[in-house]
Amino acid sequence: MKRVILILSAMLLWSSGMFAQTGELSGKVIDKEYNDVLPFANVIVKENGTGTTTDFEGAYSIKLEPGVYTVVFSFIGYETAEISEVVIKENEITEVNASIGPLSNELEEVVVKATTQENTEASLLNVQKKSINLLDGISAQTFSKIGASNSAKAVKSVPGVSVQGGKYVYVRGLGDRYTKSILNGVDIPGLDPDRNTIQMDIFPTNILDNIQVVKSFTADYPADFTGGTVNIITKDFPNKEEYSVSIGAEYNPSMHFNKDYLGSAKSNSELLGFDGGLRSNPIPPDVNIPPPSAQNPATSYWTSQFNPEMAAKRETSFMNTNLGLTAGNLYDVGKGGNKLGYQFAGSYRNDYIYYEDYKNGNWRKFADKSINEMDPDKLQNGDLAKNNILWNVLAGLTFKTDKSKYKLSGLHIQNGVSTAGYLRQEILFSDAVTIFKDNLEYTQSQITNLLLNGKHSNEDGTWNIEWKLSPTLSKINDKDIRVAPFEYDSDTGDYFLSPSSAGSPLRIWRDLEEVNLVGKLDLTKRHDLFGRSARLLFGGQYTYKQRDFTIQQYQIRYQGGTGVEFEGDADEILNPKNIWTVSTRRGTFAEGNFEPTNTFDANMNVAAAYVSEEFQITDKLKSIIGLRFEKFDLYYTGTNNQGDVVLDNEKILDKADLFPSANFIYALNDESNLRLAYGRTTARPSFKEASITQIFDPISSTTFNGNIDLQPTYVDNLDLRWERFGEQAQMFAVSLFYKNFKDPIELSYFLSASDQFIPVNTDKAQVYGAEFEMRKNFGFIGGESWEDFSFNLNFSLIESQLEMSDAEYERRLLSARDGETISDTREMQGQSPYLVNFGLNYANDENGWQTSLFYNVQGKTLQVVGTGDVPDAYTMPFNSLDFILNKSFGEDFSSNISFSVKNLLDSQREVRYQSYGAEDQIFSSFSPGMGISLGYSYRF
């Protein structure tokens, strides 16, 4: 009997031990001298001696019974850190990160002690304090605090950053041409061929880990940026099983549940951002539609194949809605500590946008120089509506050993935008003509990106190798752009087709396909230089981009009349009863309008290699000196409409350049640094710019013209910055910067046509300015409760000066008004003279309340450079004021409700013509209205 009792007791003890509830301690150890992970550092729990070492990424994890512990972090030749008050709970993961640095020569041992909370704050501050770059950023934990649903909204809170049109990032007031956007460290094409950067609003924050904004150049970054590089980093695998779901809605009183909203017939698949065939081109590319003079029945047959809908229809809009899902887990594989993780994230968004009284216009100066006021050329106003569907999926697998990590991830973004407009246009410069036109558009865009990434380390962590392979396919299809203009006779009240003055009805299909292939290799060697720790960084990158662009365009003409019987109803244009036939010899017919200049094939190659050395010159002075080589080739295949310029895989740009960089950081004391940085960078023309294409915008009735002779811009950048860091993420910084541009690219009008634009190189330009940044909480007022309140303020004052070309200067002199003085310099296109960001915040982690008020404004900015006869057009300041309120509740604050109001001031977006002694005139104007959002998210 005693034997049975002993056996049962032993089994009970064994089973209770097997099923004992434990927690987990995990985190990373950072080398604070180089702001990098510290592999194979020692992590010891003081109370029980349990320990481990970090892996090659500086990560560690230890299973512990619930309790309060002190954790010791150490490494040979480095100071020791003791973190106390570490609380381990059952079935929970407690994250503790530590930063330790090399010992000074005269010191044998240093022990740095801190509590868990103090250590977390110190780690966050250390990233900025020790970064060799001028680096700012925003993490996933901050996204919810500021109520940001996508990366465009999130990055606005980064100092010196503004977002134009809710999509495009401007750093230090420089336009998107001078801002580089990359995804996980590699190039990715955008959804908008008119831009050189990717639009930020297509990345929902639920798929992002963080966003980094680098403002100074180092050799390991691509050389084609000037204002800054924005690195969008997607989520890695989590360290535990986690899931989340979110749902939200936004109501804008001027846009939603509006009975005057405009739309058109849709296929069911458009709810998923792609056309189901309704908008496909019914005419094969090899078909030439015969003219009526051929008396061929094929004329009426092919014309009747078009979708007859041409008019925008009034309907009621819905409010904006969104949905998000995330999932992830980590598994132990085998007995060697190997881990396999996965992550999944998806989101869906459906937005309704409506601009009542949308305006745009073209103005000129009078030939009589004594008249200061401007003369209208073309004026347009009306209603414009957009339905924007955006969804994406991110999925990935990660396998990790103690010395290697492999990651495979895929990202697909699908975007469908349906546009409908009804506009009144007045052509006034020559014969006064009034035009009413319907406009229907559908743009289907998609990006599919794969990333295969590997990281490896040797036994002692002195060598690290990282490689990336990333193919991307981008497609943009403008499917069945429909323009139906009617000239209006106010005397008779008649509407009629008038190709000579109003233009013909149009059907347009545009297709763009771009392939990006990127390979990147980075090697790091830790070593000693002059008795101090140092790092040698070297590697290379190869980028290949290829773009196909085609336009198929058809004009709808009328044989035997003017269509006055249609009474201005655009749907009557292709009504079967009104289509030309052999028997009636009267009616509408389609005519192919192929223009060779609108079809091109282009590709570019960038081969790069770099080397840099990061080392301590003294105990207080750190530097990184680097050199990057880039070989850039651009090839073009296409022809102009006249056929006298034929390019067949012609190399139009061939550049081999060296880009040096030098960054220094001097630690004045433990809280403040002085930084000095120099770098040479470039801004290259896009495929669309370096071309002979002509692209018509049916909304604004303007045409973009490529310039095959464009050259890259080269920029010398100099930065000086003093910064002081305090506790609880407080800081104060003042920066001065200078940029010298050679051959900057500017968008200008044609001298003979105010609705035609072309990019051109100008001689040179300079940009210089100052940046001020302050983050402060109100704890200095007194009492712990005030520490929950904080504010952040940053503003930039920027001066730009561009030396005009002789041709531009002469044009401005010839059109100068009486008494006007013309200088041979002006501001740069896209350069803002000032930028202000201000935020007032409250956050209490104990009660779960967070609220913020954010203000942003950017100064008057030159958008389009005038020709002399046509004045300059400026984007006017937009005063943006947003309010966000969040409440987290439930077990472990797993539920969150968010409420926000954007554009509290109900500001108007305007671009205006400005000329000497004249009243401002509208180039474009619309009201985005005020958006009220409500959202809910749940983590489990």
Image: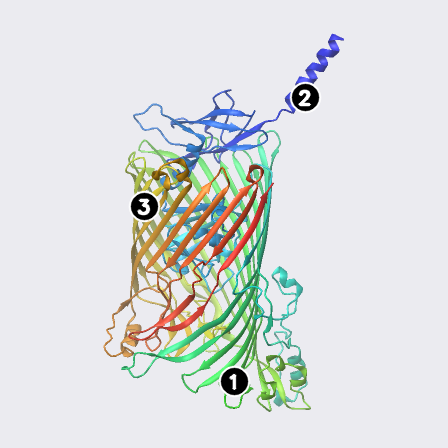
Pick whichever of labels 1 and 2 is earlier in the sequence: 2
The secondary element bearing badge 3 is classed as: strand
Q: Residues within 10 Å of mark 1 (few under 14, many from 20)?
A: many
Three-letter amino acid code of the residue under disc 1? Glu
The residue carrying mark 2 is 15
Quarter of the image with the N terminus is top right
Residue 292 spot, x, y in % from top left = 62, 88
- Residue at position x 67%, y 89% in the image: 582
Give the alpha-carbon distance from disc 1 to disc 3, as whole Å.
59 Å
The disc placed on residue 733 is 3
Give the alpha-carbon distance from disc 1 to disc 2, as whole Å.
89 Å
Horizontal side of residue 649 vs 714, given as left or right: right
On the question of residue 390 being in view, the answer is no
Three-letter amino acid code of the residue under disc 3? Ala
Q: Quadrant of residue 907?
A: bottom left
Give whichever of 354, 23 is nearer the camera.
354
The secondary element bearing badge 2 is classed as: helix
Mark 1–mark 2 contact, CB under 8 Å? no
Q: Residues within 10 Å of mark 2 (few under 14, many from 20)?
A: few
Give the alpha-carbon distance from disc 2 to disc 3, as whole Å.
59 Å
Quarter of the image with the C terminus is top right
Give whichever of 886, 861 is nearer the camera.
886
Give whichever of 243, 715 is nearer the camera.
243
Mark 1–mark 3 contact, CB under 8 Å? no
The disc placed on residue 807 is none
The disc placed on residue 487 is 1
